[in-house]
Image (spheres, helix red, strand yellow):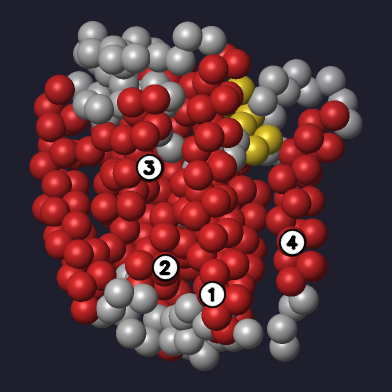
Amino acid sequence: MHISEGFLPAAHAIGWWLLAAPPLVYSVRRVKSILESNPKSKLELAAVGGFAFALSALKLPSVSGSCSHPVGSGLGAILLGPACMPAIGFAVLLFQALLLAHGGLTTLGANLFSLAIAGPWIAYAVFRLGVTLRLPREGAIFAGAALGGLATYTVTAFQLALAYPASSGGLLTSFWKFLSIFAVTQVPLALSEGLLTVLVLRALEKAQISASIGKEVRV
Amino acid sequence: MKVPGWVLLLLAVSLALSGLVWNSAGPSGAEFAGADNLAAQAAGKPATSFAALWRPPSPEVESGLFALQAAVGGLLLGYVLGRRSRHAS
């Protein structure tokens, strides 16, 4: 889902940065206050960050004949709340932009918006909806993480379509073009991500880290 | 109703493998290029001349750094799980 360095016009790059900056600042303060009020949450935070780091490094082959990677942001959205995720996403994206030339600094605002803001909020909303509808809890977690991952890529396709509208057909044609590159590739990966998120949350619960997933989350 | 962990893991792994198996069934011409790069190609020329400040000098270095990223993530997660399990038991 990374938009490569230089692939957004200056106005778009700045616009996405402006949109992503307030949630980023808020999430840094929020992470700080969580850590101060409950030192034990350091471990939750480390687990969430570790999961996001590991998953976004795994480029997996897909049925479409291309490769992509899961995002790993659903876990944190469900465990700590979506408002915490921009800080973690920023760490991952900065690492990849500086050391791997994957993504970029000018496009970091846009990538942050898709990976660490839109994706986590969708994941959280789907999870809450599932809980409200009295789905099995792990079913809600699976759906949240999987759809959050897919949402990230849908937003990326939209961002690229905005920057590169088709000369005939405009925004919508272009959106479908980019979505077709990402979506087919991402469906099996998003499903894997949903399964892995359930597994990791199970392990965390077993280790008595998160007895009350989704209950203590305030956004 | 709780699906056993190993079933979930098996499913996750087979989803990842399904891409390889699906594409090896015929001459599909699958190259497993990165979707990010395909999107960049579809976009055409970069919109600005701003280029990455630093690039890994070779694919080997790049894959090493990706492995480093996964290792750091795995270590963090593993540390937390191991530490808490010990305390819990």
User: In the image shown, does B83 or A118 lie closer to the viewer?
Assistant: B83
Amino acid, disc 4? Leu
Mark carried by residue A43? 2
Mark carried by residue B84? 1
Look at the numbered disc 4 and give the secondary structure of its residue.
helix
Read off the residue under disc 3: A92
Which residue is at the far right?
B25
Look at the numbered disc 2 and give the secondary structure of its residue.
helix
Protein chain holding label 3: A
Q: CA distance from mark 1 to mark 2?
A: 9 Å
Q: CA distance from mark 2 to mark 3?
A: 18 Å
Q: Is residue A194 left or right of residue A115?
A: right
Residues at discs 1 and 2 in contact (Cβ within 8 Å): yes
Residues at discs 2 and 3 in contact (Cβ within 8 Å): no
Q: In front of the other: label 4 or label 2?
A: 2
The reply to the same-chain question for discs 4 and 2 is no
Mark 1 nearby-residue class (10 Å; few <14, some 14–19, many ≥20): some
Q: Residue at x 49, y 55 (%)?
A: B76
Residue A82 % position (x, y): 31, 65
